[in-house]
Amino acid sequence: MQDLTMQIAQIVPCTEAEGPGKRFAVWFQGCPLRCPGCCNPEFLPFKGGHTRTLASVTEELRRARDESGVEGITLMGGEPTAHAVAALALARASRELGLSVMVFSGYTIEELRARDDATITELIATTDILVDGPYVREQPDTERRWIGSRNQRIHFLTPRYSYDAQWRQKNTLEIRVDKDGVSVNGFPAADAVGLWKGWKRKKPLPTVAPRRAEQQGTDTT
Ligand code: SF4
């Protein structure tokens, strides 16, 4: 199993912009969905990225825990459930290291459960926090930290986390400059999505202020 390979778009070993606490963030390469305004259009094709082994990513995760004090892994995309075997393997590795698991999926939990896929079912069972649903550009979320749009729900699937004060802080954007160039992660303000990548919008952003969410869209199922 340690020889399992996976197609990774990007890893940020320690970030506070992708979920509670310090987290090891993994973006898979490849997503079958096409949400207009997606922050990561370069992560959508299934070709590209870097081929990594489970063993090497797990070792990097262990180092991030020991040296940076990360408390969990966050799996994103691309679409983690389109890489379900690798996502489950990383979720299990994270649990074995005593770390938590957070997953962002463009599918709703109902859609994922309806697939009746044993690997996806096991991934959900190994996840502490699932943020579900597609990104909807017209419904930017300005209330919940780390969440892109108001339609997306936060499922606390274990007692490890809850909707505490850190979810209500302002969104976090991290910009890193190193020898390989500039990388950005976290969720930018709606009018800044994609700007640093020189990515051209196909449709203008809505000009009306977003309505306040009537409910937080969280649950504890
Ligand atoms: S699910 Fe995520 S990665 Fe896929 S198109 Fe939508 S926003 Fe982009």
Image (cartoon, helix red, strand yellow):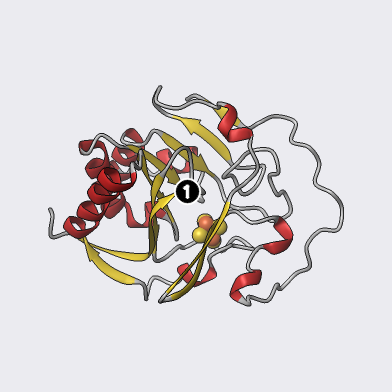
Q: Secondary structure at mark 1?
A: loop
Residue at 45% in and 62% down: 31
38 above or below 97?
below
Residue at 23% in and 47% down: 62
Q: Which residue is mark 1?
A: 105
Residue 70 in the figure: left or right of residue 40: left
Residue at 41% in and 76% down: 180
| Residue 206, position as x, y percentages in the image | 81, 58
Q: Is mark 1 within 8 Å of ligand 1?
A: yes
Tell me which amino acid carries mark 1: Ser
Residue 32 in the figure: left or right of residue 84: right
For the residue pair 1 and 167, the one nearer the viewer reads as: 167
For the residue pair 29 and 194, the one nearer the viewer reads as: 194
38 above or below 73?
below
Residue at 86% in and 58% down: 207
Q: Answer with the quarter of the image where residue 216 lies.
A: top right
| Residue 44 shows in this picture | no
For the residue pair 109 and 182, the one nearer the viewer reads as: 182
| Residue 111, position as x, y percentages in the image | 48, 43
| Residue 19 shows in this picture | yes
Numbered-mark total: 1
